Image (tube, rainbow, N blue to C red):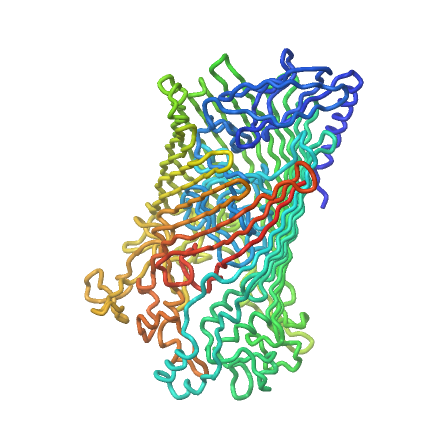
Amino acid sequence: MKHPYLAKLALPLLCAGVSVSSAYAQGIGTVSGRVLDEKGEGMPGVTVLIEGTSLGGSTNSDGTFSIQNVPSGSHTLVMSFVGYTTKRLPINVTAGQNTAVAGLSMSENTTLLNEAVVVGYGVQRRQDVTGSIATVQAKDFVPGQVTNPEQLVQGKIAGVNITTGGGAPGAATTIRIRGGSSLNANNDPLFVVDGVPVDKGGISGASNPLSLINPNDIESVTVLKDASALAIYGNRASNGVVLITTKRGVQGEKFTVNFSSQTSVSRPFRTYEVLGADEFRSLIQANGSASQVATLGTANTDWQDEIFRTATTLDNNISLSGNLGKVPFRVSYGNLYQEGIVITNKLKRNTGAISLSPVVLDGHLRIDVNAKGTQLENRFIDNGAIGGALFYDPTQPVRSAESQFTPFGGYYQYLTPTGVPLTLAPGNPVAALRNTNNISDVQRFIGNVQLDYKFHFLPELRANLNLATDLSRGSGSSTSSVTDFGNFNSTATNVNQNGRYSQYKQDKDMRLLEFYLAYNKQLGENTKFDVQAGYSYQDFETQGPLYLPYRFDRTTLFTLGQTQTVTGYYDPFRLISYFGRANFTVKDRYLLTATLRNDNTSRFGEDNRSGYFPAIGLGWRLKGEEFLANNTTITELKLRAGYGTTGQQEIGGPFDYLPRYVTGRSTVQYQFGVDANGNPIFVTALRPSGYNNDLKWETTTTYNVGLDWGIFDNRLSGTVDVYQRESNDLLANVFVPAGGLANQLNRNIGSLRNRGVEVALNASPVRSDDFTWDLNFNVAYNKTKITDLGPQQENFPGYLVEGIPGGTGTTVQINSVGFPNNAYYVYQQVYGENGRPLEGIYVDRNGDGTVNEQDLYRYKQRAPLATFGLSTNFAYKKFSLNAVLRANTGNYVYNSLAGNLANFANANTSTGFVGNLPVGIRDTGFRTQQVLSDYYVENGSFIRGENITLGYNVGKIFREGSNLRLTAAVQNVFLITKYKGLDPEIFNGVDNNFYPRSRTFTFGVNASF
């Protein structure tokens, strides 16, 4: 794939070559290197000079520097940085050559908070940061088999709750930073990959768009949490920003090859508990009718055991890094093959990445080129097959040699005496998986060219231009074979008319142009400031055709007589923004950050398109004051306070504010004549669509107070943040009065408030040459409350959400004023003297003598009130041991399996077949469904052993500087919970057909040479 911006590099690189050639002719050379801190991480902003001259400058964001035009001979290299001890190093420069200085490091003399922190549009010293920011470096990532990038920091950052959507390869992940700010607009954070704000939405064919980024290419993950840090990204930053920085080559670094390989095996960690064949057979014989008893078989089938398997994962990665002449580079390739624990489910991924980071024009122009490409193949499964395995009669066999099952591939199925599928009967779950081929093919390319130029006549002034694109292509199909029970057509004369074939295709393009000027200046000895102003243009296009379903032959429409043509879709939208930020630092103690962003979106009408998002942050570094400067116990102490506003506009489609016509539903068609065979021809018509011209920005205002501290030479350090976040003009899709063009519209309806506390603690109890021990603990408490939902009718309970099985249109959650969002809306169960729930008996909460929907009440919530994370790292000589634990409290889960199926009605009201029951029937004995009983809303608090990894560093292989490391890891080690269902960690709070998480054993090798 050609990149439209790569050609722009030719002229600067050519100029660089001319400059270098001239330098060699004059008997001068260059000096380059990388300055590291005590942790081995690059230090930006370090002043590096040739002593006694004006030659030199500051290190780049990764700690690298290059000094041009240095006369040949002996010199002294001087490195200085506020808070660090100045370092001098003798060097010898040879004419016409580059002197690469290795092993440059600086040690702190006052604080460890001078490390570089990636922020929006640049980097800062941590001690200058006024916002709430957390960074996890590669060395601290969660180890083991990691498919998606967000799993690298799961449990590592206070206030960041990451919930995987199950155990399927590449499963969607939900990330909530400080609880989320909206009702049902997009609550996902904004991801910025190497300076590119990528599309928040997914691509057809990929469950998780982040699975298209190889975790092995990532160097660090930084999370911006409060408005002081977020406002620079105003338009989509209400739910936080995640900055992903990938690995790249370093100037002066020697050529290095790194290879890693992991092999994993997985099994379901827990499965649903249903009755075994013998117990189920006895129950039906005792309680069922004669006809139902007659349906029982003689087999003893564990249907979950039939659809689950031991799955294998192979993950191989190789990277090459170093320098091509003066151009640092890194090239990587990754190949992942991952089987799901459900039969037929798998994922294949190939990734490639390249980065170039030349510095030219005597160090005044830095060019960063990043290109990442991914090709992903999936074979999905319908999670309904998991539910089918729970319900299917365990007394029936998987396969049968009897002739009536031959048209169904030999799989046992429920048939009528004439050999056709029994109406309303479930299909064999193993056959359903084997007979369906649901596949996808997805490609994604993220690339950018970033030019950062320090003006020759004014080095304090920088110009930064970022040109980027994010291109995704997704396609796929689902094929049900002619033997598929659910699509069997007994009236077809041609067997190829049986089965079903459907397909989809989607293209997504994002283009970005960002430009800003930054000016930094030191005023005297005590004051410095950094100001920047910029412009951003971001354009999104989503388009694709629409396809009608066909029979298995792929030529006959599934619905005979339906029109052969349908229109496609085209959904563009555009963001144009202006932003500015000013940072002031006085005496390295008094800090001020002010930010303003103006965003203009094409999603709203002209009168509502523009939004202004300001923020201000203040900091006071008490450690710098005289009364603490000489205190040897307190290493660091800084107070922070911030206020700001961010925006939200991502709900519905790009034209929801416009009156327009759209394609009608396929079930509403008009007949226009007949075809050559006399079959009627139906055409789908256009219809007017509902719209809301008053749509405008949802805004979120955040107040944050924080404390950064460290004691005993930072052997113990941490942060504390207290915040309040208020969202107003909430965007939500709600019901509207009858008489319009639609019964539901996107509207701005109310307000929501989050309040919380976050605590992060880092400790190093042991530091020695042979043994080190590091601990990280974090806890976050967040309470959400809906404070307004706009004008309402009297006694309006709220907006019902989250449907459940067990009735048409039945919902179990509600959004109401004065309560958390997505609170459960259920009846209060009455219990007998023996502690068992009484069937159909609920509390008359309003005391009117009748139990009806007026007695439903709001009970608990699905989101956790508190989240915890604990990481511990031991290193003894060549051995290491890492462990990660996570915990949630205050979250509740609706046990949909028990609520829907744990009653005798499901087993004895059917005709021609019987369905299995969950073991919960033993505790209730319910005859009929009681789906809205709070009995099924269970405490989902848990402690999970996320990962344990043992490593051994073999050391040198082949040559000096090479290294070999071996690892063995276990993921999903243990789970402690009172929840009776499959898994308490379910984002939407409804445990229904959930794909089980697996326990995974991983063996890995990592070699560099």
Query: In the drawing, does residue 832 fall left or right of residue 361?
Result: left
Is residue 887 shown above or below 978? above
Q: Is residue 439 visible?
A: yes
Q: Where, by quadrant of the figure, is residue 483 drawn?
A: bottom right
Q: Position of residue 699 (x, y in %)?
A: 42, 40
Query: In the drawing, does residue 850 fall left or right of residue 586?
Result: left
Count up the numbered dots: 0
| Residue in the image at 35% along x and 46% along y | 784
Q: Position of residue 932 (x, y in %)?
A: 33, 65
Of the pair 488 and 23, the residue shown nearer to us:
23
Of the pair 467 and 681, the residue shown nearer to us:
467
Q: Pick the quarter of the image with the C terminus.
A: top right
Q: Is residue 474 visible?
A: no
Q: Position of residue 745 (x, y in %)?
A: 44, 53
Q: Position of residue 616 (x, y in %)?
A: 43, 28
Is residue 250 shown above or below 789? above
| Residue in the image at 60% along x and 72% along y | 435
